[in-house]
Amino acid sequence: MKKIYYKEIIEIVCRLYVFFFLTIYGLGKVIGAQFYTAARMPDGLDLIPIGQVSDFDLAWVFMGRSFGYMLFIGLAEIFGAFLLLFNKTKLIGSLVLIPIMVNVIVFDIFFLDEYGALAGATLYLLMLLTILIINKEKISKLLIELVSTNKVSKISFKEKLIKYSIVLVIIILIFIGDQFIVNFFGHGKG
């Protein structure tokens, strides 16, 4: 009898399931069909005082206000989902999609009146985490490599002082440039 690779089967199920649904959600955003846009708004919603608009409607109007934002999120979902299709890129796809799903979950918790979408997003997040858990050896090797440091030769206090003085001067110059740019373009209404 052949050995059944349960982990591999579970991983493939998770990858394909998340791929399918996040591609659909991503395409919905790209074509402007998921949120309310100026051209596609429920009748009478624009007549309700803003303080009386439901959390759901307010959130959907806000998210649909910027096509650029919808396009960015939609393409990120599609890109991450596409990466799940290949063994070499499945972990990158998971790492791209996890923050998106966390954002969707937080958004759904605080802005939506009903929680069906929250349940779906939570399922997708759990499936993405399952992919990472199944590949925990690769992830742990990567993390160890990322945080390991090469032995650096001892440097004198004077050399440290010079190095960090230069760093401080550069930070101050960046801050001055940053403040100039912010003041030049304006702070917005917030």
Image (spheres, rainbow, N blue to C red):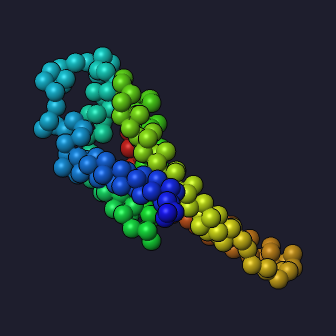
Residue 94 percent location from the top left of the image? 46, 57
Direction from residue 146 to residue 40 in the image, left or right? left
Residue 131 percent location from the top left of the image? 50, 55
The residue lying toward the viewer, choosing from 162 and 56, is: 56
Q: Quadrant of residue 109?
A: top left
- Tell me the residue at 52%/50% (across/down): 129
- Measured along the vertical axis of the image, is residue 84 above or below residue 37? below
- Tell me the residue at 46%/48% (across/down): 127
Residue 86 percent location from the top left of the image? 39, 68
- Measured along the vertical axis of the image, is residue 148 above or below residue 183? below
- Measured along the vertical axis of the image, is residue 29 above or below residue 115? below
Direction from residue 34 to residue 152 in the image, left or right? right
- Measured along the vertical axis of the image, is residue 45 above or below residue 126? above
Residue 32 percent location from the top left of the image? 20, 45
Is residue 147 visible to the viewer in this orientation of the structure? Answer: yes
The residue lying toward the viewer, choosing from 185 and 134, is: 134
Q: Quadrant of residue 105?
A: top left
Direction from residue 96 to residue 52 in the image, left or right? left
Direction from residue 24 to residue 114 in the image, left or right? right
- Tell me the residue at 18%/25% (across/down): 46
Is residue 182 visible to the viewer in this orientation of the structure? Answer: no
Toward the front, the furthest residue is: 1
- Tell me the residue at 33%/32% (across/down): 59
Toward the bottom, the furthest residue is: 153
Identify the image quadrant of the C terminus: top left
How many labels, in total? 0
The residue lying toward the viewer, choosing from 183 and 46, is: 46
